[in-house]
Image: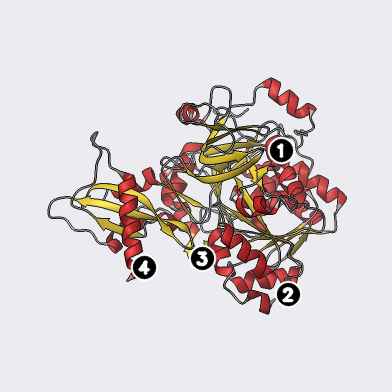
Amino acid sequence: MLEGCVPWPEDFAKRYRALGLWQDITLFEMLEQSAAKWPERIALVDSTERLTYAELVRRAKRLSEGLRDLGLKPLDRTVFQINNQASFAIAFFALVRIGVIPVMALPPHRQNEIRHFLKFSGATAYLIPDRMRGFDCRVMALEMKAEIPSLRHIIVAGEACEGQVSLNSLISTDAPPPAFRPDPSEVALMLLSGGTTALPKLIPRTHNDYVLNARLAGEACGFCEDTVYLAVLPLAHNYSLACPGMLATLYHGGRVVIAPAHDPDTIFGLVEKERVTLIPAAVPLIAGWVTSDIPRKYDLSSLKIVQNGGARLSTELRKKLRAHLGCLTQEDYGTAEGLINLTRADDPEEVQLTSSGCPICDEDEIKVLDAEGNEVQDGEPGELAVRGPYTIRGYYNNPAANAKAFTADGFYRMGDIVRKRGRHIWAEGRKGDLINRGGEKISVDEIENLILKHPSVQAVALVAMSDPIYGEKACAFATLKDGASLGFKDLSDFLLAQGIAKFKLPERLEVLDEFPVSPAGKILRRTLRDMIEAKLADEKRN
């Protein structure tokens, strides 16, 4: 296995194979198997083209040869930031075919995050679109290349600049049989952690575990060749990639339709046009849909399920969504490190409307632990821990994080406070300091460290404040140096200049004379959260 990664113990690996969970096929071979069954079925649709399974395989093969000719080798890492378009799938499968490991960056990531991914992974290549929503990714990529000696190749889906290579130019005329077949037990890709401390950690997912992840998530959602999956959220998210996502859809012979925008007319216009059966969504989208006039404008008769992931959907919103769109709601709760829980159509009504679902695999071992690491009784709150055939045994090249996140017997501590009843889970919140803005996780440590660089700031504490749409937003409390001043816009401009993603920006600034502290001198974050909630309540009343 790639140096810096933690393999499953051999006895576990043998059991997972004996049970038929690990099938020893690669992600590209998974796609090839589907193409052999359904060569002329449409696999992928975006705003410019419709690809059959056979054509998707053919293009991925040709691109993989071009990437190999460029100099990419097995186990090389490449930061992968292509946004939602057909080229995402083509490039992803091309990389995993030749054993190159994509590090799945998200569209909003900017210099601060990309620099970290490139340096920490030792990436030799960076895959980007030419532009995303008016942002020229090529300029940022050139900055990174000038700064990071190990970065040798910038590959652009679209128009390349000098010193860069266009994706289309790498598609060769022929794709001979590969000289190298990746080991299915080897790392296939790296996902990003939610980032509870500082910048995201890298999560190594193998071919074996990720094929299983996709297969079982698809089975739990009833996927088949008639499934039409609408990709609304970034495909680089674990949720949209394999939970069930693009990969599960392609495993089961369905069709992936990529939405070019997030507005309701685009989304539900595609539901009508493509006869979409499932939409993966998040709380902010759903909150907007339930008050819209969508049902009167479009034919939604094909729509069977709207999934919610990233942050818990309230019982009230689940009921409203069902009534408004006339379909099932499905809670999709899990982690990029592994465990996926889904509510099911045959769950009791109370479970469907309140729970976070149950694991997709019988071999998912789940525990709820108290602060001392002891299991609690069913119904009692505690931290969720998991061990299983698609849950990692360690982060990439991060022994310190592994020592904190994994128990001695290999259970991953998710950092979520939950209650368990049988195999069903009710998620209640985060153990660590993490702000969940509509499913996008904001590391308190990362943003505080950046704010502390501002010349006016003496000390800072970032806390979550409630929001009716996003669930949580970030509020920065700060004390200032003598004679200094700081405005909200000044702070935002300062952080953007450091190259962070916009979703991480604090959305409120409160300047204090001094922080409330404990006898030991620690900032009382709970008091700060109470303070901002009281202010929000007063503002709402007035």
Disc 4 versus disc 2: nearer the observer:
4
Near-viewer residue (170 or 196):
196
Point out the tag, 1 or 3, that comes first from the N-terminus. Answer: 3
Check contact, mark 3 vs mark 2: CB within 8 A: no
Which residue is the site of mark 3?
133
**Helix, strand or loop under label 4:** helix
**Helix, strand or loop under label 3:** loop
Which residue is the site of mark 1?
361
Task: Residue 299: give its label.
Answer: 2
Disc 4 versus disc 3: nearer the observer:
4
Residue type at numbered disc 3? Arg
Residue type at numbered disc 2? Asp
Residue type at numbered disc 4? Lys
Instruction: Residue 491: give x, y in percent of width and height.
Output: 29, 58
**Helix, strand or loop under label 1:** loop
Q: Distance of mark 4 from mark 3, alpha carbons?
A: 33 Å
Point out the tag, 3 or 2, that comes first from the N-terminus. Answer: 3
Near-viewer residue (427 or 255):
427
Look at 19% across and 48% down and name the residue there.
514
Instruction: Give left or right: position of 90 versus 285.
Output: right
Residue type at numbered disc 1? Cys
Note whether residue 497 is visible.
Answer: no
**Helix, strand or loop under label 2:** loop
Q: Distance of mark 1 from mark 3, alpha carbons?
A: 38 Å
Q: Is residue 160 above or below residue 177?
A: below
Which residue is the site of mark 4?
540
Q: Residues within 10 Å of mark 1 (few under 14, many from 20)?
A: some
